[in-house]
Image (cartoon, grey):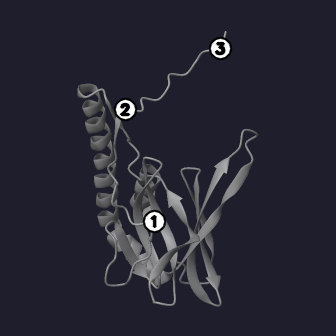
Amino acid sequence: MKRMANPPNRSAKRVYFNKDAKLDSSFSNSAVPPHHFHLGQDIYAAGTYFASDVQIHLRQYGRDENNRLYRTDKGVCVSPVLWQFLANRIELINVPSSLTEETYVLKDALVISTVFIEDVSHITCQRYFKQKDFSRNFIPGTCVMNENCWLELAQIRKRITESAMSMVFDCIFRKLLLNEVSKITPNVVVNTDIS
């Protein structure tokens, strides 16, 4: 016997939190969005909501013909837990001063390598995951930072962590609030997607 799904309540009102969100996500140097931190060049650390989860991005941005910054696929995305693990160990990851290259693996999910590109030291970050057969696959997207960007990231990691934690608590509070509203007024369909 098949179960029938309940038909949607067509008379219910929808409640959206992110009603006035802009579709254009580009920005200028003078109007950096909240939870975005400039690391140098066109690299930003940014806290975002995605699929009702908070994530921290280390990402290269590009520039359009109006000199506005737009998001590119060159970067990595980490959870707040993985970010905190990186932030706690960032001083242990040395930028190479000699011609030695090193690789660090954090929480079996993030690979950080110190490499030389044209005799200039750089730090690369790339995510990977384990498959069921214990093989590892890298996730597309790599963030390549020079030494100055890495040192800036190390200096402002506390501000990035505070921003991410405020977003996490904001997300949790909104979900709790919307669940309580839906209990009190059952005719209101609550959209908990705040991305």
Residue 150 in sight here = yes
Residue under the image location 30 percent in, 60 percent down:
163
Q: In the image, is 74 to the left or to the right of 91?
A: right
Specify the quadrant of the image occupied by residue 132: top right
Cα separation, mark 3 vs mark 2, equals 26 Å
N-term mark: 2 or 1: 2
Residue under the image location 43 percent in, 46 percent down:
52
Q: Secondary structure at mark 1?
A: helix
Q: What residue sits right under mark 1 in the picture? A: 92
Q: What residue sits right under mark 3 in the picture? A: 2
- Marks 3/2 in contact by CB < 8 Å: the verdict is no
Cα separation, mark 1 vs mark 3, equals 58 Å
Q: Nearer the viewer, residue 112 or 83?
A: 83
Viewer-side label of 2, 1: 2
Tell me the amino acid under the disc marked 2: Ser
Viewer-side label of 1, 3: 3
Q: Secondary structure at mark 3?
A: loop
Q: In the image, is 29 to the left or to the right of 134?
A: left
Residue under the image location 29 percent in, 43 percent down:
174
Tell me the amino acid under the disc marked 3: Lys
Query: Residue 78, relative to residue 73: is it above or below?
Result: above
Residue under the image location 38 percent in, 41 percent down:
191
Dot 1: within a 10 Å radius of its alpha carbon, few (fewer than 14), some, or many (20 or more) residues?
A: few
N-term mark: 3 or 2: 3
Q: Measured from the top left, where is residue 40 in percent x and y?
A: 43, 83
Q: Nearer the viewer, residue 188 or 192?
A: 188
Query: Residue 167, relative to residue 46: is it above or below?
Result: above
Give residue 121's mark: none
Q: What residue sits right under mark 2 in the picture? A: 11
Q: Measured from the top left, where is residue 32 in percent x and y?
A: 34, 76
Q: Nearer the viewer, residue 186 or 145?
A: 186
- Marks 2/1 in contact by CB < 8 Å: the verdict is no
